[in-house]
Amino acid sequence: MISIKRKIGQDILIGGTVRVRILAVSGKTVQIGIDTPDGTQVLRAELLDAVREANQSAAEALSAAFDPIDTDSKNDLAPD
């Protein structure tokens, strides 16, 4: 991780296509503006982490709701 000190109104460029600008500072809160190319998704990390956790929990619950398939038993629907 890179640590860079910036003042209000100063920018950081990432990869030549992403510009992060410090807009305001109030106590421990920093307001930033992010300019990205069209189609670039910008997400808050804590929201992405929460969605991933919810998806994992849902997948585990779904998996637990179904018994594993017994491949050794005879298929009752197959013709004799």
Image: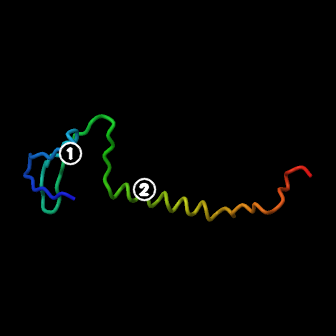
Say which mark, if any, is on residue 73: none
Eye-nearest disc, 2 or 1: 1
Mark 2 or 1 closer to N-term?
1
Q: In the picture shown, does residue 41 fall above or below 50?
A: above
Q: Is residue 52 left or right of residue 76?
A: left
Q: Which residue in the protein does label 1 denote?
A: 14
From the viewer's side, name the closer residue of 76 and 34: 76
From the viewer's side, name the closer residue of 24 and 71: 71
Residue under the point 81% across and 62% down = 73
Identity of the amino acid at label 2? Val
Q: Is residue 41 left or right of residue 6?
A: right
Identity of the amino acid at label 1? Ile
From the viewer's side, name the closer residue of 25 and 78: 78
Kindly report the distance in space between the C-alpha atoms of the residues bearing marks 2 and 1.
Answer: 26 Å
Residue under the point 42% across and 56% down = 51
Question: In the image, residue 34 lies at what x, y percent?
Answer: 22, 44
How packed is label 1: few (under 14 Cα within 10 Å), some, or many (20 or more)? few
From the viewer's side, name the closer residue of 23 and 18: 18
Residue under the point 31% across and 53% down = 44
Q: In the picture shown, does residue 59 fall above or below 11?
A: below
Q: Quadrant of the N terminus?
A: bottom left
Question: In the image, residue 28 lies at what x, y percent?
Answer: 16, 62
Q: Quadrant of residue 49?
A: bottom left
* Element class at badge 2: helix
Q: Which residue in the protein does label 2 denote?
A: 51
Residue under the point 64% across and 63% down = 65
